[in-house]
Image (tube, grey):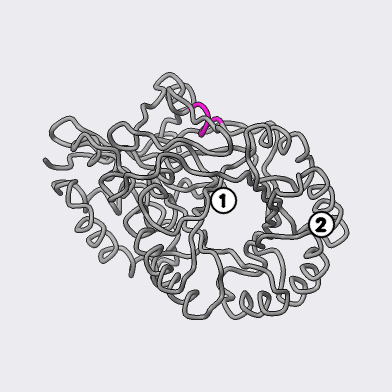
Amino acid sequence: MKIIDIEPIVLTLPLQNPVVTSFGSMNTRTGIYVKVHTDTGEFGIGEVWNNFPSWGIYEKIATLNYGMKPLLIGEDPRNIRNINNKLFSSCEILGLQWGATGPIYQSISGIDLALWDLLGKHCHKPVYKLLGGGNVSEIEVYASGLGPTGFETLVEKHKEMGIKRFKLKVGTGLDKDLAHVKKMREILDIEDQLMIDANQGWDRRTAIEHLNQLNQFQLSWVEEPVRCDDLEGLKIVRDATGLCIAAGENFYGRKHALQALNAGAIDVIQPDLSKNGGITESRIVAEMAHSWEVPYAPHFLSGAVCFAASLHFMASVPDGMILELDANPNPLREKLFTKPFVVNKGKIAVPDKPGFGFELDEEFVNYYRIDLDEL
């Protein structure tokens, strides 16, 4: 079996309600998917992270077409580790020279996910079984992407699904954050857990000052209170507030993760499978974190392919805490597949069909697909 083509697929949908963070707003949802074709007619589908910035699509499509495709043509797609090593050894230094570590890792992530999906289909096994799993049939999720305002209806909707953990965006100013977190705690049940996400929005002093006041609302963790590369700052904030620190969606690969673990900077690591190197690299990160007794909770704010991959990942890689579920309406997660994900008692079943266990809704894909020649 040989790889004969790499096909990027881009879908763009307008958002009625923008997704707001401390560093900006997302006004459209753009999904980048990559289909790996083989000479046997078999194929796999992966996903490349592309939420911010809006122009990131151009870098990633160019990286897939001109950087990755020439390295992949003729390779046996079943040799996933070898292909991963080839892509990283060929592109990591280029990424440093270019200043584009993100697009390199994100593009490799999409290819890696596609290869695992393809291998599962070829072997007639779900990916979690290829990864050594088999005893976990469903994964607990928490509702994220909430706020900073207008979150009440979304919270009630997800409480009805049996979800018990919720994550609220902060970083809009102390008075506003206090009001929003207080309101969130009031509408949650006593046993519900509340996390907050600052999206790197504070400096060290501000983070400590604000968190010492927000901590009265029984926070389970604070995510990225300072810049993700300020490892000393993360540790200082944790030591000063006593709060559990979560980070990792913006760590690229094992080297960044190792630096954070060695620094004692985090209590929960959050690899994103469409961003940090796919299943292959994220599994190494999770296994490394195990040595520091740091659990993982995958980051997710993308489309259905990454979400399906994350379910398989958590069903097979030990020490997973919980999986993030974007609470905002997201057609790329809800309508991309012919069979949508269903939350039942706060959990989602792990797909049991070959590969990631899904089929694309071709009508949906064709309707929202962009002609790449027009980019």
Earlier along the polypeptide chain: callout 2 or callout 1? 1
Residue type at mark 2 is: Asp
Q: Main secondary structure of the magenta part?
A: helix
Residue drawn at point x = 39 percent, y = 49 percent = 313
Nearer mark to the viewer, of 2 and 1: 2
Percent from the top left, x then y, of residue 16? 69, 31
Residue drawn at point x = 73 percent, y = 74 percent = 241
Q: Is residue 223 left or right of residue 276?
A: right
What residue is pinned by disc 2?
Answer: 177
Residue type at mark 1 is: Phe
Percent from the top left, x then y, of residue 103? 43, 56
Q: Is residue 68 left or right of residue 341?
A: left
* Residue 294 visible to the viewer: yes
What residue is pinned by disc 1?
Answer: 52
- The residue nearer to you, when weighing 7 against 46, is 46
Percent from the top left, x then y, of residue 277? 37, 57
Mark 2 vs mark 1, CA separation in Å = 23 Å
Quadrant assignment, res 229 = bottom right
- In magenta segment, residue 333: yes
Percent from the top left, x then y, of residue 341? 49, 31
**Which of the image's four quarters has the N terminus?**
top left
Q: Is residue 207 left or right of residue 131?
A: right
Badge 2 density bin: few <14, some 14–19, many ≥20, Cα 10 Å:
many
Residue drawn at point x = 27 percent, y = 59 percent = 87
- Magenta extent: 331-335
Q: Secondary structure at mark 1?
A: loop
**Which of the image's four quarters has the C terminus?**
top left
